[in-house]
Amino acid sequence: MSKILVTGATGNVGKHVVSELAGAGLDVRALVRDPSRARLPERVEAVRGDLTVPETLEPALADVESVFLVWPGYSAETAAPVVEAIAKHARRVVYLSADVTDLADGEEPTLFHQEVERLIRRSGITWTFLRPVGFAANTLGWAEQIRQGVVRWPFGQASRALIHERDIAAVAVHVLTSAGHNGAKYVLSGPGRLTQEEQARVIGETVGREVRWEDLPRDVAREHLLAAWGDATFVDGALTGWESFVTSPEKVTDTVERLLGRPPLTFRQWAEDHAADFR
């Protein structure tokens, strides 16, 4: 099998993709902004590059057959030349998207993932889209509040089927190393739902600390998220999505078990894996 390029190679999902591919003895190249600081498994080639600077990608794409693509940030501004470069060199791309709907021709995207997907579909390259629901790792943003014993966040009764990043990575590796996934759009979830308030409680139980929940008003949460994320469209979309899960719980799928032959990891297992981050 030819070389596999992993973008986002030091991120929550990408680092596990790199590790699993390298552990299987495959030829892996990691796209990183600073190779001297990247902690990667032995035999993994680190190449400097930045998806927001498309002209840096040519060396990373040499002799690459497959690309695991993780898009940085909240804008698809440089996505067109990046997808064009990937399609020029590689045979297929596995894109880490989100649980979004397909865009019709001429339809405006409501989330950058939709625009990236559309560019990939139009590029002529063989593709697979991974569409996870909420990431369990996003609750790491509560870490300081967990330490203080109270989480202040909007929509405590939003019911979600959060997925462990290791499950996303395992599906990515399976797709990258096996046939039959061309044109697939895999919606990935955890094995069941918990409300956000229940998630905070599970984390507290894992680290041995009682954790209370206080609902944050939407307008106050919006101010905090705008300061942290900077993109009003993304912030408003996230808040609307979380609010919808109060009355229409997030979907649970069997995709992880169907592809990997085992149940997905639970949120409690995720919390145990990350307990040190909350202590």
Image: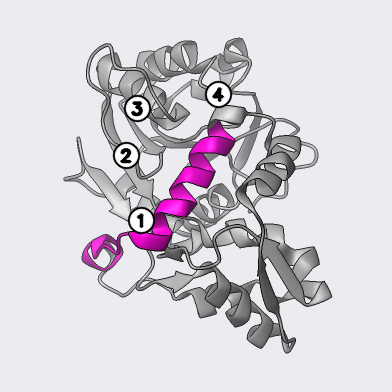
From the viewer's side, name the closer residue of 103 and 91: 103
Residue 213 in the figure: left or right of residue 91: right
Magenta region includes residue 237: yes
For residue 7, above or below residue 115? below
Q: Amino acid at mark 4?
A: Ser
The region drawn magenta spans 234-259
Earlier residue among tags 3 and 2: 3
Earlier residue among tags 2 and 1: 2
Query: Which residue corresponds to mark 3?
Result: 117
Magenta region includes residue 91: no
Q: CA distance from mark 3 to mark 2?
A: 8 Å
Earlier residue among tags 3 and 1: 3
Is the C-beta separation of discs 2 and 1 under 8 Å?
Answer: no
> Residue 66 at what x, y percent from top left?
38, 33
Earlier residue among tags 2 and 4: 4
Name the front one of labels 1 and 4. Answer: 4
For residue 279, above or below residue 226? below
Q: Residue at x 64, y 46 (%)?
A: 10
For residue 151, which quarter of the picture? bottom right
What is the secondary structure assignment of the residue under circle 3? helix
Query: Which residue corresponds to mark 4?
Result: 75
Number of callouts:
4
> Residue 217 at what x, y percent from top left?
64, 54
Is the C-beta separation of discs 3 and 2 under 8 Å?
Answer: yes
**Badge 3: few (under 14), some or many (20 or more) residues near its Cα, within 10 Å?**
many
Q: Residue furthest left?
A: 180
